[in-house]
Amino acid sequence: MESEEVRKIGKLLEPYVTYDGFNLWDICFGGIYNVFLKNPSRKNFLFTIKSNIIRMQISRIHKKRETVVQKELKDSDIFALTYDINHVHTIIPLLKKFNHEIIQFDSPSKEITKKTLEKLSLPYLGLDSLMDIEMAEKLLAADKFLDGKWKDFESDEKIKKILGENYEFIYDVLKYHMKTRRRFLEVIRMELLVEKLYSLKKCKLIIVSDDVNPLGQIACKLAREKNIKSLVMQHGQLVGNPLGVISADKMVVNGYADKKYLEEMGAEVEKIIVTGQPRFDKLSEMNLSKSLACEDLGWDKTKKRLIFSLQMPTKGENVTVSAAKCFIEEVNKIKDKENYEFVITHRPDFDEKFLPTIPEGLEIKFSTTEDIHKVILSSDVYITAFSTLAVEAVLLNRPVLSINLDSNEYVDYSKAGVGHRILNAEEFLPRLNEILEEEKFKVAREKFIENYNYKLDGNARERIIRVIDKLLL
């Protein structure tokens, strides 16, 4: 099935997937597209997961009749609602300017966002803290509601005939969302939490990052009902994501390539504003010297340095793990290793069980606490699966190798002229040598900046602030 066909099926499924006026199929379309359509091999992995975490939380609050201590919420013109620590970093530049509150939707066990914002003296509220007995009771009812709707769908011979050859696909998707993983129940919880938030906290503008995720869509749709303006900020790569519908009043994007992609996906052009990415603003002031970066880090400036960014793979996804395995195995084949330094970077919360085996005798430096931009500047080539740090590497005048052995969905740095995309492991060393020996990859940098960051002038934040000012008028 094509993505647009899958989106349209939401209308047909309304009797089974509508809750409190929300079409749950439409809200979850991004995940349906990414897991079941773009990467269908992932669904077998996902079906083995049982969703007990939410029901345990509901049960704990409901059975013990716990009194949930509600934080006093102060009204403000603006607040930000975001999904995880990566998205928080996108919004932080604006928060520093306004000192407005960031509200985080995260699993109760995660503290990384809270600690990050505490270090920056920025206010924080975990959305889960708004859960109360009334909400737990609503979720218990919603759980039964989903059970009933799933049984209705399974027994409906008419819908089976209407869907025809697509029935098996739709059946698998609904089974995951309504029975196995209960993803729809998580979405209902988000809706209840955001509704509660809006009832406790009055504001004029909500900022979200990437409304392809259900939280952003819910926040923007409910905001519209309450006459609250909404703005979505691009966080990561748009290419490959089903972003034909923008839920917010406006969306600020990094560059013209992002705007073009949204237009091709059918998004409303008048909602899209190209501003650049505010978290890249500080790069405009950095000295691009490799020698200076090496001196600051205490690293050998004479070595050819290859930096690989290791990412935490999403459930069932293999692109990041296969890229890391390719990098390790291929650099191990380099004969004059004494002239090289191989560095792997990853976030502090990376689970080392996803790190491929490192061959005996291969020396790799791990960098987890050093300034990532200085680490990139100390390098000769930046390598990743699909981290947006690759964009920052180009902004810092370093060529990029992206290893996409299991997918060609991501930004093609070959077409952009600033590096190469590796689709087969045997291409790695020839492409690496080409990059190390030629300067042509740095020539295309200015056009790349226009396409993927508009301007590297340090003023992206100010451009977004002007958009915010207009929304608040």
Image (tube, rainbow, N blue to C red):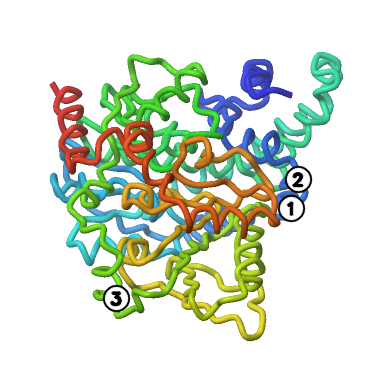
Residue at the spot 75% in from the left edge and 49% down from the top edge: 47
Q: Marks 2/3: CA distance?
A: 42 Å
- The residue type indicated by label 2 comes to Ser
Residue that numbered label 3 is attached to: 297
| Image coordinates for residue 137, horizontal then vertical, percent | 51, 45
Pick the residue in front: 215 or 459: 459
Residue that numbered label 2 is attached to: 41
Q: Of all residues shown, which one is farthest toward the bottom?
A: 361
Q: Marks 3/1: CA distance?
A: 41 Å
* SS category of the residue bearing label 3: helix
Q: Nearer the viewer, mark 2 or mark 3?
A: 3
Q: Are marks 1 and 2 in contact (CB under 8 Å)?
A: yes
* SS category of the residue bearing label 1: helix
| Crowd tier of the residue under label 2, counting other residues whose Cα lies within 10 Å: few below 14, some 14–19, many 20 or above | some
> Taking 287 as reference, is 440 above or below it?
above
Q: Nearer the viewer, mark 1 or mark 2?
A: 2
* SS category of the residue bearing label 2: loop
| Crowd tier of the residue under label 1, counting other residues whose Cα lies within 10 Å: few below 14, some 14–19, many 20 or above | few
In the picture, residue 246 is in which quadrant? top left
Compared across the picture, whether 72 is left or right of 128 comes to left
Q: Which mark is residue 45?
A: 1
- The residue type indicated by label 1 comes to Phe
Pick the residue in front: 217 or 64: 217
